[in-house]
Image (cartoon, rainbow, N blue to C red):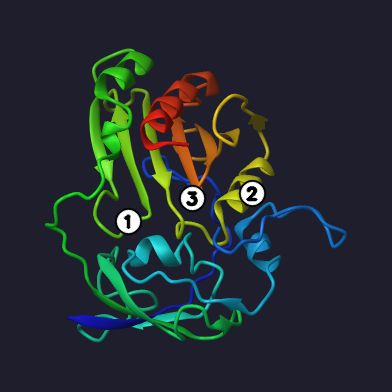
Amino acid sequence: MALTVAAGIVAAGCSPISSEPPTTATPRAPTTATASAAGPAPTSMAELCDAQTWPRAVPDVVGQHLSQTTNIGALACWDNIRGVAPDGHDPINNPARPGDVGYRITALSPSPGTPVGRHDLVTVQLADADTNAPPAFRPCDWVTTDEAAGILGGPITTRSWGDDAGSVDMSCSYSLGPGGDGIHAGLRLPGAFPVDAASQLALAAAQPHVTSVNGIGIKAVCVFEPNITPPSTTLSVLLGGDRIYRATGWYSMPCDKLKPVAQAAIDRIGG
């Protein structure tokens, strides 16, 4: 049963390199965030969106998850996204229940490719997502349990996230258990960024506590995030095909411990 959704989304304040378990927050036109005569490179999502040339073409996000698209994904720079769920309510602006998620985009108005201003209305038609569908991706296979246990130093449990069809952000959590070390690692595909992958990595590289990491992917940076819970370190690796692989280690895990996780996954998914 299809639905139309409309919502006012402001992408300011999101961390550019988020992971699910640590409480943090992490582009899709061919524009890369760089410093220019007009000013320095963007350091926040809001600045990145401000730096784009408007109007911009509406991206084709049909088939994607609503939650991955409007919050930090391909529609995140537009601040007047609206819609109507199958039962007629607006799950973005007026959620009917806590965490009103579980929708897949079926159509957009204006249609994909139409130039639209940042504050112009974009309407998203939705259908309920099939929560019982079998997984389309297996992110926990990209770094095996044995590999992750060897890095973390003990037996682990795993949990897959965003592994169903239509996902553009799929990942796996590897945990030693409550209070213990853990790693959350995953792949972001085209459509998972407000602008594009290169701009997203540039945004991460503009954060405090950042170091460059050599010998992996096209370019990689590691960012220490002391103000999230738990304090974490995220390695972000720019890959070909407008993709980013990220590995976040909890409790201030050193970057050297995250690099073999990312390398093992990239060896399997391709760089």
Q: Is residue 217 visible?
A: yes
Numbered circle sitting on residue 203: 2
Name the secondary structure under disc 3.
Answer: loop
Q: Residues within 10 Å of mark 2 (few under 14, many from 20)?
A: many
> Percent position (x, y) of residue 58?
51, 76
Numbered circle sitting on residue 25: 3
Name the secondary structure under disc 1.
Answer: loop
The residue shown at (62%, 25%) is 214
Q: Are marks 1 and 3 in contact (CB under 8 Å)?
A: no
Q: Residues within 10 Å of mark 1 (few under 14, many from 20)?
A: many
Label 1 amino acid?
Ser
Sequence-wise, the earlier of marks 2 and 1 is 1
Name the secondary structure under disc 2.
Answer: helix
The residue shown at (33%, 25%) is 179
Q: CA distance from mark 2 to mark 1?
A: 23 Å
Q: In the figure, is residue 110 to the left or right of 183?
A: right
Q: CA distance from mark 1 to mark 3?
A: 17 Å
Which residue is tagged 1? 167
Q: Nearer the viewer, residue 108 or 211?
A: 108
Q: CA distance from mark 3 to mark 2?
A: 13 Å
In the displayed structure, 216 sits above or below 36; it is above
In the displayed structure, 196 sits above or below 126; it is above
In the displayed structure, 234 sits above or below 154; it is below
Label 2 amino acid?
Leu
> Percent position (x, y) of residue 225?
56, 36
Label 3 amino acid?
Ala
> Percent position (x, y) of residue 236?
53, 37
Mark 1, mark 3: which one is toward the viewer?
Answer: 1
Q: In the figure, is residue 247 to the left or right of 165?
A: right
Q: In the figure, is residue 260 to the left or right of 182?
A: right
Mark 2, mark 1: which one is toward the viewer?
Answer: 1
